[in-house]
Image (spheres, rainbow, N blue to C red):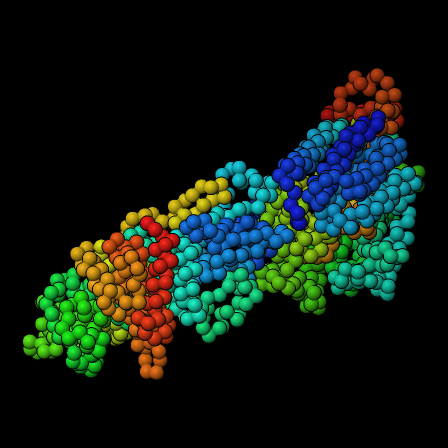
Amino acid sequence: MTGLPGMGTDVLILALRIAMVVALYAFLLALLAAARGDLGALAAQRPSASDAPASTARLIVLAAGTSSLRPGTAIAVGATVAIGRAPDNELVVDDEFVSAHHARLVLHAGSWWLSDLGSTNGTALNEHPLRRDTQVRFGDVIGVGGARFKLAPPGERA
Amino acid sequence: MSSRGRWRERGLLLLPIAVLLLGLAQLALERTGQVQVDQFASGLIFTATIAAIHAVLSWRLPHADQQVLPIAAMLASLGLVIITRLQPALALRQSVWLVVGLGLMGAIAWGLPSVAWLKRYRYTAAALGLSLVLATFVFGVDPNGSGARLWLSLAGLYVQPSEVLKVLLVLFFASYLDDYQELLVYGGTRLGPLRLAPLPYLAPLLLMVAVSLGILTWQRDLGAALLFFGVFLALLYAASGRLGLVGLGLLGFAAAAWLADRLFAIVRVRIAVWLDPWAQRQTAGYQIVQALFALAAGGVSGTGLGYGLPDRIPAAHTDFAIAAIGEELGLIGSLAVVALYAALVHRAFRIALATRDSFAALLATGLGAVVGLQALVILAGTLRLIPLTGITLPLMSYGGSSVVANCAIVGLLLRVSHEAGAVAAREAASRRASGVSERRRTRGHTPATTRAAGTTASLAPDGSAP
Amino acid sequence: MRTNIARLGIALVGAFFVIALALTYWQVVAAAWLNLDPLNPRNIEAQQRAARGRILDRRGQALAESTSDGGEQVRAYPEAGAAPITGFHSQRFGNSGLEAAFDGALRGAEPTNLGQWIAQRFLHQPPRGADVVTTIDARIQQAAVQALGDQPGAVVVLDPRSGEVLALASSPSFDPASVDAQFAVLRDAPDAPLLNRATESAYVSGSTFKIVTATAALDRGLVDLDARFTCTLPIDLGGQPVDCKNSIHVPTLTYKQAFAWSSNRTFALTGLLLGFPGPINPWLDDHPPGRYPWTDASIEPSAQVLTDYARRFGFGAAIPFDLPVRPSQLKDSGTPWSVGLLASTAFGQGEISVTPLQMALVTAAVANDGRVPRPYLVSAVRSPDGEETAVHQPGGWLAEAMRPETAHTLRDFMVEGVVRGYAAKAQIEGVQVGGKTGTAEVGQGQTPHAWFVGIAPADAPRLAIAVVVEHGGSGSDVATPAGRAVLLAALDAYPR
């Protein structure tokens, strides 16, 4: 630095320097304060299953058995899902061990319920035979014949 | 996040402007003992452009996150200050590039049909990026004499295609991974307890990764190669959650690094310098040694803007901006810069978590990762945590393509944020519209059951009902 | 997927935290040793910026100072003759002399109070060095340099009462301002201009050493001051031929006259007789009363006595001083004492190697009632805001070499040397001067070194001087006039 400034200017420069640092840290603190405020707003906005207009859940194919379904595909389902081999089901599973109308998944009062419709080989829930209508939660695995489906929230990845 | 005027953003934006003007005033006083208007040219251009982009955002993207632009502006402002300190002639050019970048940001805010629209052009985007990088094979120039011909010269301006490629590749990765997300998580053949990745479906993705890494490595642009691979792994993890895949990728990287050490002299040199820069302090290690001297000289409070010797560091205004900041603004300055980058990454990830659209989420994640990883790689290299690579500090370092690319990233983030915010605002409005009865229900109850209840047939919950 | 994204985000932010830790390490922890690294360009620049303190003579005249030449510091040496004292200051070649010994103070590295600390750290006031105040009188120094002229040699002038060094000259010398350009030339020059001959060169002392021998004999009461003896015949002492050439024209001598005329045989015998009971006068005669005592007994006791007295004067040890001083030796450490060696040592030859500063101290002890003063060059360090810190604490002697009566006797001897002896060329009108010459043989075919040591005024000495002219020849013809010239200037410049 050639020609160092005089004392008075030095003090002014020091003042500017302090002001710059103050502005920088005021900024960081303001960010921090804003982030805290956002946290509450964000939590309140978390989408829950009920907010989804059209699709209330997804069934994800884990295993296809002998059906023509592809593992990994996700099937959006509405409030009622009829599962079976017949083509009038919402979820058609053409596995050889699946009855024409095998099971039904229903959204009732905010929870999903699985019922067996009198199938030949029975319906499984998390690999246990389904004996009566049981509530199904996200993450549970529904089994019909050789096929396995996982219930997952809508628009989200499990 | 109020959608009634972006007042928070407005308030926050005052501070980067203040920092820039205060910094320029300091430098002006030191150089000439007085303050003259022509020394503030870059400051005035910056202020005007920031005001303009804020206006555009208020009009077109009212729901967008209000902190992202201020953070980016603060980084750019600090960058302008340090560039004015190190190479005053380049400061004006940097501010012009910022105008271009902010203009692109405005175009994204205004002209982009939707974020989803981007998904359709992923192959085009990837092809464009790769062809630009390939062009450097033939037309590449090396204006800085750093040994690698990574630039294209367009009418006297230098463009670095790898910066463009990074944005386009994030787009490509995000959209591809979005489509095949379930496959990644659940698919693939089982091999006993392990589950392999469903390779056939991922082939285009892997091909793209291999090609881009190959080109970059061939070009000796190892910093960019490292960055791209890191972003790819990050997005892979975000989409699939499978740490195993990430681990596999890291193993592959380790193997590639070992191979690179064998094949490329420059890699050997960089690693040797990383391990012991003092042994080559006058030759290959000169840069890092001077950078460390600069950081040490700064101490906690710094030497004061203009009073240190950061100009002893070669390429201080590009790769080693943090050393210059560390010397002249001290630890308090350099920690603030680190905090700013962390804040930017944090905002990007917040935006990703706030959006419903999975593609937008992955896009925001990828963009946040690319900025964050770029900053991390150069910071870690300067601090001897990893070997040095030649990439710039986003928004702070001098470099037109880098500035424009990072402004585009900010613009895309704002776009994603706005769309998510718009959806949320719509839903909140519709919730309010559907009546007072909603309010009587406590939180957690789902109003949609009123619709669902009508469709259920005779289902009598037996004793096992909750 | 949300959890994955959240985890990724936390990992990235965590990585920044690691960066923050690394920054703290490099900027605070490692800074301690990085900032001291000599290759750090900031240290070199800081040296440039710091206003280096001056080196001043006792009256405030600058011997070395820094002037600003458009932002850069240039070190100037207004008194080029003071080069052996100031040394040089060079960015590339380092420092020497007082520039080196007091480098820290001259650089003004440490701020001493909060105000200075703020000014340096935040207002970027360059640190100002402290001034080093020496005891040198520039006028006497000039006289000493002039007296030597082109002849290689050295001059030391000090105040025997306190030990303050008033002049320290070495020839040939150099221009400290030219060191940056000429270092290699200066370093390799055959006449060694960078060498401080006053403190770092040791010479054969010649007859000036007889003061030490005489001290030993007188202090032990071995000499009858009134008894006369004859000294005309040469003798062989242990293979060493010793004659009376100097004093042959005075057929009978008192011990005082033997001293004034630098009678070699007298002092050779004195040295050999130091360990035997006195008085020694009969043995000094051309015809001794019998066989010399050392023919049947060992001379070790005599050697011991001489060594002991030499040690009191400072021989054999490094003399504490602001500049490095080469120790003076009575003889080479490997050589055993023999009759011949002891004899020749006693009259000032043998293997004696002595620095001019050492001889000045010997002389000063005679002037100071037998107490050897502690020599010093720097009296105080004066900080930029005027605060003076005394460097030298007054008082304290290196040793008591002899009893005050002995010193008085020797003073008379030295006055005799000037009035009626070989040191006649040191006479100064109106002032009583005491002195001793020496012509130190250095081997076949080589011109001897010329020595002169003196005190003035002899009745109340405030000056002690030692002069040596390398290969100058006769002490009384070459060194003594030089010494006189310096004493003249010194008596004028140093009136109290």
Residue C192 place in picture, x, y as percent: 45, 70
Task: Judge from the rendering whether residue C207 lies leftward or rightward of residue A126; answer left or right.
Answer: left
Residue B94 visible in the current orientation: yes
- Badge count: 0
- The one of B433 and B157 positioned closer to us in this rendering: B157
Residue B389 place in picture, x, y as percent: 70, 57
Taking the view exactly as shown, the residue that stands out farthest to the left is C289
Q: In the figure, residue C481 lies in which quadrant?
A: bottom left
Above or below, B317 relative to B29:
below
State the residue at coordinates (69%, 67%): B265
- The one of C54 and B189 positioned closer to us in this rendering: C54
Residue C19 visible in the current orientation: no
Task: Judge from the rendering whether residue C418 lies leftward or rightward of residue A71; answer left or right.
Answer: left
State the residue at coordinates (75%, 45%): B80
What is the quadrant of the N terminus of chain C in the image?
top right
State the residue at coordinates (81%, 45%): B95
Residue B233 place in picture, x, y as percent: 74, 51
Taking the view exactly as shown, the residue that stands out farthest to the front is C429
- The one of C299 and A37 positioned closer to us in this rendering: C299
Task: Judge from the rendering whether residue A77 lies leftward or rightward of residue C105; answer left or right.
Answer: right
Q: In the figure, residue B273 lies in which quadrant?
A: bottom right
Residue C263 place in picture, x, y as percent: 20, 73
State the residue at coordinates (74%, 35%): B18
